[in-house]
Image: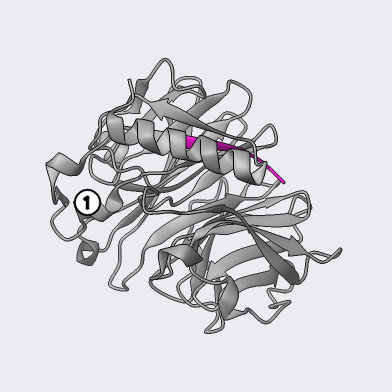
Amino acid sequence: MLNIKSLLFFLALIWLNSCSGQKTELIALPFEQDLFPEGITIDSRTKTVYLNSLKNNKIVSSSIDGSNPKTFLKTNEYSYLSGFGMTIKGDTLYALGNTLPEDKNSSILLLLQLSTGDLIDSYTLNDSDFHYWNDLAVSSTNEIFITDSESNKIYKIKRPDKSIAVFLDNEAIPNCNGITISPNDKHLYLASNNGIAIVDLSSKELMNKPREEYSSIDGLKYYKNNLYGIVNGWGEQSQNGLFKFELNPTGTEVLKSKKLTAFTKDFRIPTTFDICDGHIYFITNTQIDNLDGNTNKIIDTNKLEPYRMMKIKVE
């Protein structure tokens, strides 16, 4: 059941939708309120949504309508860490994790079988260099590309090889967060501090000049020759939102952007999202502003609230 604040937010959303003509839906998710989910991914075959937890080092799941909530991965199972980017390919869930607080400096990637929850494989990065695996994209040939938000590096794993290689290290793409790949495996799209960067996968060349106006992006997805991104890094809340970034026909340049959904004060730091059956899904209130990253403790338990997932038709 939605509480009063959630109900008011829901009613406000209906009013905004009626004004804009935009078709959206708000779905209540009955998970524990101290989850603090950063990563979200959806199995389009079973219509199951998966969320991970920054605080509790676990992964939960439910039907896409919020019913049938379950624990998919128990706390610290298979040495999982605080949850970050996730994606699904086939029957495999790819889940990144990092240690909190940040200075403990360890990152992990788990490959989990969706049908059983069993561990398929794991990769760990734990060395003297400071790194922070944030998000990932998987090519059609099972090459895994991972952003490092604390450097200029993009990592690459080519399964079944167990080695972790630096695919790219370029000052023009600092502190990348979101990452996505074109369906033909030709271009890699990176949400860097300098803006959206487009990399040719075969030559590793930067195809465009990133623009700062297209920065502060967290989650990033390629869909039908457009990019979609959640912008949450601007200090002024009115600048944040869910955006569409139109690409040129060759996919090598961002032509323009359009804000699809504005983030008001009721949006408590949306982060990543997924696209399923022509709709975008994301958590409107991850509440990670209420989690102390240095101590991994909740700042104010009185401010915890039920999680809400927004469903919006892709434009």
Residue 206 in the figure: left or right of residue 87: right
Is residue 209 visible in this depiction of the protein? Answer: yes
Q: Residue at x 48, y 51 (%)?
A: 162
174 versus 144 height, above or below:
below
In depth, the one of 187 and 308 nearer the eye is 308
In the displayed structure, 197 sits above or below 81; it is: below
- Helix, strand or loop at label 1? It is helix
Q: Looking at the picture, how far across and down is residue 167, in whole percent?
A: 57, 68
- In-front residue for pair 141/7: 7
Give the residue type at disc 1: Asn
Q: Is residue 118 visible?
A: no
Q: Is residue 234 above or below residue 163?
A: below
Residue at (17, 51) in percent of width and height: 296
Classified by dominant secondary structure, the portion drawn in magenta counts as strand
- Closer-to-camera residue (100/36): 36
| Quadrant containing the N terminus in the rendered view | top left
* Residue 71 as seen in the image, left or right of residue 190: left
**Where does label 1 land, which residue?**
290
Number of marks present in the image shown: 1
Q: Nearer the viewer, residue 61 or 108?
A: 61
Q: Provide the residue span drawn in magenta.
A: 309-315
Q: Would you say residue 311 sits in the magenta stretch? A: yes
Q: Quadrant of residue 95?
A: top left
The image position of residue 270, as x and y in percent, is: 43, 50
- The residue located at (74%, 62%) in the rendering is 246
Q: Is residue 41 above or below residue 166?
A: above
Residue at the spot 43% in from the left edge and 17% down from the top edge: 67
